[in-house]
Image (cartoon, helix red, strand yellow):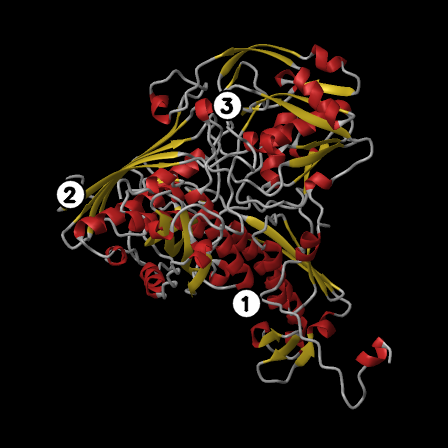
Amino acid sequence: MSHEAGTATTAAEPAPAAEPLPHGLGASLPHADARAKTEGTFPYAADLWAEGLLWAAVLRSPHAHARIVSIDTTHAREMPGVRAVITHEDVPGTPRHGRGTPDRPVFASEAVRHHGEPIAAVAADHPDTARMAAAAVIVEYEVLDPVTDPEQAFEAEPLHPDGNLIRHIPLRHGDPDSAGEVVVEGLYRIGRQDPAPIGAEAGLAVPRPDGGVELYLASTDPHADRNTAAACYGLSPDRVKIVVTGVPGATADREDQGFQLPLGLLALKTGCPVKLTATREESFLGHAHRHPTLLRYRHHADADGKLVKVEAQILLDAGAYADTSSDALAAAVSFACGPYVVPNAFIEGWAVRTNNPPSGHVRGEGALQVCAAYEAQMDKLAKKLGLDPAELRLRNVLATGDVLPIGQTVTCPAPVAELLQAVRDHPLPALPKDTPEEEWLLPGGPEGAGEPGAVRRGVGYGLGMVHMLGAEGADEVSTATVKVHDGIATVLCAAVETGQGFTTLARQIVQETLGIEEVHVAPVDTDQPSAGAGCRGRHTWVSGGAVERAAKMVRTQLLQPLAHKFGMSTELLQITDGKITSYDGVLSTTVMEAMEGKELWATAQCRPHPTEPLDAAGQGDAFVGLAFCAIRAVVDVDVELGSVRVVELAVAQDVGQVLNPAQLAARIEAGVTQGVGIALTENLRTPRGLVRHPDLTGYALPTALDAPDIRIVRLVEERDVVAPFGAKSVSAVPVVTAPAAIASAVRAATGRPVNRLPIRPQAAVIPDR
């Protein structure tokens, strides 16, 4: 019998109906590009090609701080195959750029202020020729002593024309003379982390016949990048177009604009397409990192453990340029007390320039650093008061209606107590067996050194909070268009898919609203209206809201003729499973029948309610919404070697509403795993401002073997009434919370203070045990 005959069905045995594909909000709809990415056929920026392509290379400074005496490009220009060499003299427009503050030169001219700063760029007919020509540019430096300690930046000579101080925020809330019966103090240091994207930066620039240029980039904020590039090139924005290619993973606005801008300059100068693919080293040197931070804290509490006052000093190392350091400082100062009720708070926050690599927007910026510090303080208070750490936290947690130290009332759902109770009450994992057969359970891992008798188990807690969308008066707006033709819907929105799942969400919104199963999301370019940056959960809220409004407008267009025909309002009609029915059952038809011969479309915007900048006392309604998370960490620590194994992380989070269960779980798990790296391994070392080992061998990312068991024990679905669908962003807050929880667990296991991230082995060793 043939295989075909063997699998055929008979009339007596009808084939089972195919399972309907999941669709609509609340379903675990898979990513549209999931198959292509897993098979390796998804096109990224590094895969781009064009006829007559030239290759680019950038010369970067080997010094952290130096005065440029001269730049000689003669030898580079004379090399066979070299088509162009450009420096600061070849920038026709604005010579400065920057995501937050435009204080960074496209090419260094008088001085270099950090290791890896661009000085010149080359276009040649072969990538090796371009690299050799860049190396042939002769730069004479007068090497200067770098300022690498942010505390020294206050007294040092100005490193930048704008000075060394980027921002100072003095927060004043409550009675400065208040004091508690119990006081604990601490000094904490947070290291420098790199976003470490899966793919390094790459791009292609193509000159246009009208004298403009098109840039094909893995941009997460294409309109901002377009405007910066146009200003740099001396062109109007309509003559510069950015087409977003596949983004190979992004945890924030990780793109290096100093990488993007030379591309267009070279394409305009040569009249040819130019491609640049960064090496991993260039990627480490170019894009922004997490702010290294120094934090001094003093917590006051009464005899029952209720917080009375928090005093803190927070110093952010911005590196050579400001970037988004002002935003990071605002988050750090605003959340310096954590999700706790603190009637009196006095916080001093500074962001300063140094000669270290630039810092900028990395997921959870500002909030992560202070979370590690205030949770360490809560552990100290619990120990001094003789209270269980979870119980102390429960006595102080924030709730809806409470007031933040910035004077803003928490109007969104804030179920912090419920989250903490959920992780506290979750069963603890079983203890490992003290036998050689279970040596893989040792913190050293398989074949690791150490003895089971030296292993101590610890349980710790972390409570974290982040803000969603921009802050302090940022104009958050997104525009989307929904078109329907021949039963197929298309969404046009410039919200970039960075892995956060926006394209999947957009499809679900249209499916839910219009009952159309086949939905496509168009590629993103700057011919579309702006949707803003892909960070802080913006696109779930703002761009998702715009898609929903546009889809509802199309729904009204679809239903109005039917409602008019039957003498009823559109509100009395509903769309369910592709069918249109009336409340009384008189009308029943399919969406496809009602759509036949029609082409409908609508464009809509979503703009959340405005916020305001913090005033001179650090007060103001600065945030649109907040998200919270609780994590209980269980760790095993070898107290002789200082090695740490994260056994389990129990997570509870308020999510507003679950829109895609599988996608939400994946985002939480990814964020928690990123937090493990920040807690234990990730530290970009920069002695004297020089990046040491700028590669994925020297920078230790957590792998699948390092990932602990992650238990999502509670998702609190309490809708935020001001957010579309009531949903909250989910990615950043577990990243913020996990390192603090792991440090808390290591403290519980060792009794050591653990005041630095990542946790160094010597901090987890019990001396003279």
Give the quarter of the image for residue 527: top right
Measured from the top left, where is residue 156 in percent x and y?
37, 17
Mark 3: few/some/many CA within 10 Å (<14, 14-19, 20+): many
User: Looking at the image, which residue sits at the far bottom?
Assistant: 12
Mark nearer the N terminus (3 vs 2): 3
Amino acid on which disc 1 is placed:
Gly
- Asked whether residue 406 is in view, the answer is no
The amino acid type of the residue labelled 3 equals His
Of residues 632 and 401, the one drawn nearer to the viewer in this rendering: 632
Mark before the other along the chain sequence, 3 or 1: 1
Q: Is 174 on the left-hand or right-hand side of 288?
A: left
Do the numbered discs 1 and 2 sit on residues whose CB atoms are within 8 Å? no
Q: Mark 2: which amino acid?
A: Ser
Q: State which tag comes first along the sequence, 1 or 2.
A: 1
Q: Residues within 10 Å of mark 2 (few under 14, many from 20)?
A: few
Between the residue at mark 3 and the residue at mark 1, the CA separation in whole angstroms equals 47 Å
Q: Is residue 447 left or right of residue 634?
A: right
- Foreground residue, 443 or 40? 443
Q: Is residue 110 above or below residue 288?
A: above
Residue at horizontal 59%, vertical 48%?
498
In x, y percent, where is residue 429?
39, 63
In this rendering, the answer to whether 131 lies above or below 449 is above
- Return the residue at label 3: 114
Q: Position of residue 366 (x, y in %)?
A: 40, 40
